[in-house]
């Protein structure tokens, strides 16, 4: 295993001096207006917008570890405003016009995150840029064209997306065998640990209490029970995303899907010139297994993708430590896309979980009978979507009817995941088929999309 550090939550914390210390735990039984479970992006953005709307509202956030311990402090740093779910599936809970409006509002979250970070003085390496999803075979290029045409049919503004050919794509980043790329404009690169830690400090300054080292053992109407005491609240928000399965009664709500990232040593200038990655564009590919990357503020390459996709019984990692075979797979993806990097060493590797609903579609809502709200199921698009969740949940908690509260994802309830071992078999079968599809396409010259990928999607309802 050729990597200096494995785990320790993430490189993003090493980048800011190491894993932070803990805030004080819940001191005992308390009563507040709103209790939020989980101090990641969703919970913190919800607290922020609640305090912006009603400065006098009392809010307590309870967190098992520390603010930003989960996906919020481990992700790839893409703030994309992207609609990455099946539009067709949302027709069961809304109209075509409602889905288009939701997508329009979701795109605005990138500028909203920028506005808040500038207003509140959060230094998170925020940089507006483009995202380039490369095709390295004719089949991948055809999938990009299909995705572009589908987005256009849903009236996504043409200024948001651009489809470019191979020479143009290679002129931006010299990805091997570039057939073309889908360009998403007006996205942003961030350092996620800086963003989540900065946001936690901001809400604290506004009067929100964050209690760490406080594990939740139950959520019911008006009450959150923890290992440190009980919080009584008229409104409760479950903002646990990939860790939702750990709350009794939610074991099959969303499963914790694993994703992993490796970070290189600082890249020398001569290699950057060979790559041609002169800006800080986000980078992805159109393979079925998929990868995502960014050029960091410190001139490293962070490359992420799926490792072991799901652990039996919804188990999670040990503070970000990932498997040696996952590191090797990510290194192979890096070399496949950017062979100019083969001389580079890897400084850090880690993994984390993201919440995946049974229909692979995000949701936010609040049950008026119990006063319990929730948001999540971002399927890897949480940096920007969590901001929109925070705005939406603040409206719902305060019983306000706004342009957000009637959107198709609000109060959507997908069916639960199957019991074990069926969900383990289904998820692992899906990713086995994806990897086989990629190998088959490569072996055949990549001329047509493998039917195995379509079978994988049908297998799990993706």
Image (cartoon, grey):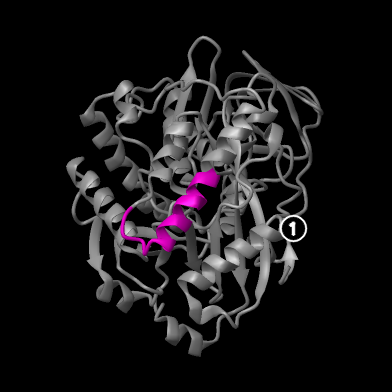
The residue under label 1 is 8
Query: Does the magenta segment cover residue 447?
Result: yes
Residue 7 image point, x, y percent: 73, 58
Q: Using the rendered image of the protein, determine whether residue 59 is visible from the camera's viewpoint.
A: no
Q: Is residue 272 above or below residue 231?
A: below
Query: Does the magenta segment cover residue 120?
Result: no
Residue 163 image point, x, y percent: 23, 61
Q: Using the rendered image of the protein, determine whether residue 201 is visible from the camera's viewpoint.
A: yes
The answer to whether 391 appears left or right of 251 in the picture is left
Q: Nearer the viewer, residue 284 or 13?
A: 284
- The image quarter in which residue 191 lies: bottom right
Q: Nearer the viewer, residue 459 or 252?
A: 459
Magenta: main secondary structure equals helix
The answer to whether 139 appears left or right of 395 in the picture is left
- Residue that appears at 60% across and 62% down: 329
| Most distant residue in the bottom direction | 270
Residues in magenta? 431-448
Mark 1 closeness class: few <14, some 14–19, many ≥20 residues within 10 Å: some
Please state, as top left, top right, bottom left or bottom right, where the N terminus lies in the image: bottom right
The answer to whether 193 appears left or right of 140 in the picture is right
| Most distant residue in the front direction | 444
- Tell me the SS state at disc 1: loop
Residue 325 image point, x, y percent: 68, 59
- The image quarter in which residue 161 lies: bottom left
Q: Nearer the viewer, residue 33 or 452?
A: 452
Q: Is residue 396 above or below residue 424?
A: above
Residue 159 image point, x, y percent: 20, 57
Q: Nearer the viewer, residue 428 or 356?
A: 428
């Amino acid at each position: 295993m050729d990597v200096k550090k494995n785990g320790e939550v993430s490189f993003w914390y090493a980048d800011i001096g190491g894993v932070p210390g803990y805030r004080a735990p819940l001191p005992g039984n308390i009563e507040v207006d709103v209790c939020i479970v989980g101090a990641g992006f969703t919970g913190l953005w919800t607290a922020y917008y609640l305090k912006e709307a009603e400065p006098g509202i009392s809010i307590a956030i309870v967190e098992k570890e520390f603010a930003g311990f989960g996906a919020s402090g481990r992700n790839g740093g893409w703030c994309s405003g992207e609609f990455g779910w099946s539009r067709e599936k949302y027709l069961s809970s809304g109209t075509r016009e409602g889905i288009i409006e939701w997508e329009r509002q979701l795109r605005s979250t990138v500028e909203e995150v920028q506005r808040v970070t500038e207003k509140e003085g959060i230094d998170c390496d925020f940089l507006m840029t483009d995202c380039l999803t490369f095709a390295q075979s004719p089949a991948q290029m055809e999938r990009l064209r299909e995705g572009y045409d589908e987005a256009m049919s849903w009236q996504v503004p043409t200024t948001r997306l651009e489809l470019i050919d191979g020479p143009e794509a290679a002129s931006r980043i010299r990805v091997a065998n570039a057939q073309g790329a889908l360009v998403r404009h007006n996205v942003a690169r961030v350092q996620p640990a800086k963003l989540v830690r900065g946001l936690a400090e901001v809400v604290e300054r506004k009067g929100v209490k964050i209690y760490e080292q406080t594990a939740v053992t139950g959520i019911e109407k008006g009450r959150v029970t923890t290992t440190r005491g009980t919080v009584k609240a008229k409104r409760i928000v479950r903002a646990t995303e990939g860790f939702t399965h750990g709350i009794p009664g939610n074991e099959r709500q969303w499963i914790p899907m694993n994703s992993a990232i490796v970070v290189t040593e600082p890249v020398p200038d001569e290699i950057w010139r060979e790559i041609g990655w002169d800006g800080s564009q986000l980078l992805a590919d159109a393979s079925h297994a998929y990868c995502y990357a960014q050029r960091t503020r410190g001139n490293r390459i962070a490359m992420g993708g799926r490792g072991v996709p799901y652990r039996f019984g919804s188990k999670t990692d040990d503070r970000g430590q990932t498997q040696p075979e996952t590191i090797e797979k990510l290194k192979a993806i890096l070399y496949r896309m950017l062979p100019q990097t083969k001389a580079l060493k890897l400084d850090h590797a880690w993994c984390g979980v993201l919440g995946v609903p049974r229909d692979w579609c995000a949701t936010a809502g609040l049950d008026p009978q119990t006063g319990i709200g929730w948001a999540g199921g971002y399927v890897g698009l949480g940096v920007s979507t969590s901001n929109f969740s925070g705005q939406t949940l603040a409206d719902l908690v305060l019983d306000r009817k706004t342009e957000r509260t009637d959107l198709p994802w609000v109060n959507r309830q997908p069916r639960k995941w199957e019991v074990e071992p069926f969900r383990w078999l289904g998820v692992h079968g899906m990713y086995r088929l994806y990897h086989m599809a990629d190998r088959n396409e490569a072996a055949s010259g990549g001329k047509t999309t493998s039917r195995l990928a379509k079978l994988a999607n049908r297998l799990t309802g993706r």
